[in-house]
Every structure is written in structure tokens, then in C-alpha cells.
Amino acid sequence: MNKKNPFKTPEGYFDNFASDFMAQLPEMETTSVRTISSKGRGIKLLARLRPLLYAACVIAVCFGGYLIWQNSEVQRQEATTAESNNVHDQYVDDYLDCAMLDNGDIYACISE
């Protein structure tokens, strides 16, 4: 309705707000932090080995993809070979039908 903001802050409220707020906070105790050198070395070692681990993962993924690709190539070649054998057998069967040779005649020719 009205474009005026009904909420207002008193004049000078935020002038000393930060210092007043900090004065109201309780004092914190100071504590010293002791570092353990063996953990630090382990973290440094892990940080140094991280690129090698990444490289090993990439190589493993590439090698796995290569193996899958090779397997599909072998299956494709086997299918092509089986198909060509079937075509060759079909030609032999057609030739034998045209020559009017049956199994008995073939065995007689081979045995002589």
C-alpha cells in the first residue's frame, strides 16, 4: 500500500555497534595446538602421490576400454569368418547339386 518502510532504527544505532557487541562477548581461552609430525608426513606423502594415483586410474580406464574394444573386434571377425564359411558351404552344395553328386559318389571319389 504505502511504499514507506514502517521499520526504522534509531539514529546512531550502528555507529558503535561492532565495539559494543564485541564488549559483550565472553573472553575466549587461548589454547595451543600441537602438531604431530608423523601425520604431517603422511599427508604430504599423499599429496605428492595424488597425481600418480590419478594417472594410474586414467591408465586403468584406458586399458579396460582397449580390452573391451579388442573383444568386440574379435567377435566381429569371428562372425565374419563364420558368415564366409556359410557362403562357401552354400557354393559347394550348389555345385554338388548341379553335378548331381550325392554322398555315395563323393565318398567313392575320395576313396579312389
Image (cartoon, rainbow, N blue to C red):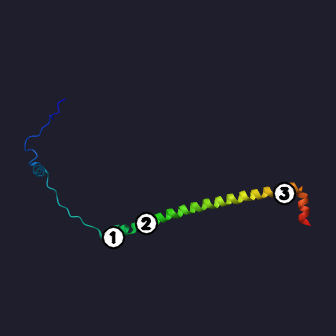
Q: To which residue does mark 1 refer?
A: 41
In the rendered structure, find residue 101 and report the number of the disc placed on it. Answer: none
The amino acid type found where label 3 is placed reads: Tyr
The residues tagged by marks 3 and 1 sit, at their Cα atoms, a distance apart of: 80 Å
Q: What residue type is disc 1 on? A: Arg
Residue 80: image location, x then y, percent: 68, 58
Amino acid type, label 2: Leu
Categorize mark 2 by other alpha carbons within 10 Å: few (<14), some (14-19), many (20+).
few
Q: Quadrant of the C terminus?
A: bottom right
Instruction: From the image, state whether disc 1 or disc 2 is nearer to you.
Output: 2
Q: CA distance from mark 2 to mark 3?
A: 63 Å
Looking at the rendering, in which quadrant would you find the N terminus?
A: top left
**CA–CA distance between discs 1 and 2?**
18 Å
- Left or right: where 7 falls relative to 37: left
The local secondary structure at tag 1 comes to helix
Residue appearing at x 90%, y 63% in the figure: 109
- Choose top left, top right, bottom left or bottom right for residue 93: bottom right
